Image (spheres, rainbow, N blue to C red):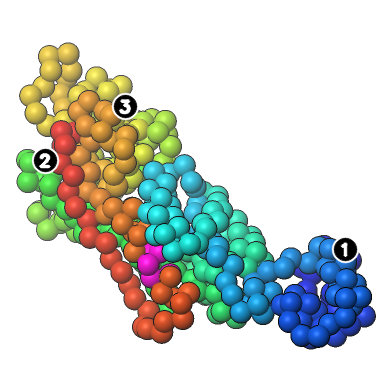
Amino acid sequence: MSSKKITITDVALQAGVSVATVSLVLSGKGRISAATALRVNQTIDELGFVRNRQASALRGGESGVVGLIVRDICEPFYAQMTAGLSEILEAAGKVLFLLQSGPSGKGLQRCFDTLLTHGVDGIVIADGVHSLSGLQKQAQEQQVPLICAARSGGADGLDVVRADNVLTAKMATEYLINRGHKQIAYLGGLSDSLTRAERLGGFCATLLQYGLPFRSEWIIECDYQHKIAADAAEALLRRYPKISAIVCHKASVAMGAYFGVLRTGNQVGSGAVNHFFERQVALIGLEDSPEAELTEPRLTTIASSARDIGHATAKRLLMRIAGQVFDVQNIIVPPVLIERESA
């Protein structure tokens, strides 16, 4: 056989029986002779047919497995969200099957197909995706509930559990302005990110609301790795030394920016300046992580709890798996200020 996906029809043809017979063997129901059942099972093994959700459905049960697709499991947000999701699912007797689609999301379709093949009861896709129509159609055809646990919107026709990115950025920017900052930069995120677009919208709107200048050269695109963020923050401050505060796109960006500020000979914070440093630069992150407590000073953040997003997503998905019918919902986990000493 070729490398194409083996179907129940392929098994029936190879074994010389009907599709109905293969279905009965998979389900363990019906009056099938031992010889026929043996031949079908041997053919299944020879062809590499995956006893997936079709078999589970025929048995009238569930696989007990839920699939989760994230872009990068190293990101603190995903780690916390996955923990929250797993806590609720495990309490319901289900196991989480985690796949990584890659930083650019190029492996999303491959991951999705893998989960369907393994017969999961439901699928969660994390992070914002520009278009889910194709995946949504596949899920509907196989009657697999699909939910987005995203940091941005944009998933029409699907339940979405997410943070309010516009409000998060607005709260962070307003916090800095109320503490006297007027030269505020934005650091982090990539141009194709829906999350970044929403957060930048909140950031820029708040600057304009308070009559502060919007300077495009103070909005810096960079990835989330600590070193990349540190390099970007250092370059930004050396070129524009009047910047007094930075809104950081993610927790990991804020951590990198912390070291970037120190490299320039400045101090992080907004209190009294230590005589070893030239001046202070305030930092505020738009997500929180345990590492934010480790810096000196500790990092102030505005964050929607990733763990709470995981909890809400799991509860919604379990309702869908149970067959409950209700309108599609956009569930927003509100942001809160976690005030420390960096801003």
Residue 38 percent across, percent down from the top left: 88, 71
* Quadrant position of residue 340: top left
- Mark 2 vs mark 3: which is more N-terminal? 2
| Residue occupied by mark 1 | 46
How dense is the environment of label 1, judged by Cα within 10 Å: few (below 14), some, or many (20 and up)?
few
Q: Which of 216 and 310 is in front in this view?
A: 310
Q: Which of 52 and 21 is in front in this view?
A: 21
Please give the name of the residue rendered at 28% of the width and 36% of the height, measured from the top-left corner: 292
Residue 81 percent across, percent down from the top left: 39, 53
Residue 255 percent across, percent down from the top left: 32, 34
* Main secondary structure found in the magenta portion: helix
Residue 259 - label: 3
The stretch drawn in magenta includes residue 316: yes
Q: In which quarter of the image is the N terminus?
A: bottom right
- Is residue 185 in view? no
The stretch drawn in magenta includes residue 53: no
Marks 1 and 2, how far apart at CA: 69 Å
User: Which residues are drawn in magenta?
Assistant: 313-317
What amino acid is at disc 2?
His
| Residue occupied by mark 2 | 181
Numbered disc 1: secondary structure? helix
Residue 254 drawn above or below residue 119: above
Numbered disc 3: secondary structure? helix
- Mark 1 vs mark 2: which is more N-terminal? 1
- Is residue 321 in view? yes
Marks 2 and 3, how far apart at CA: 21 Å
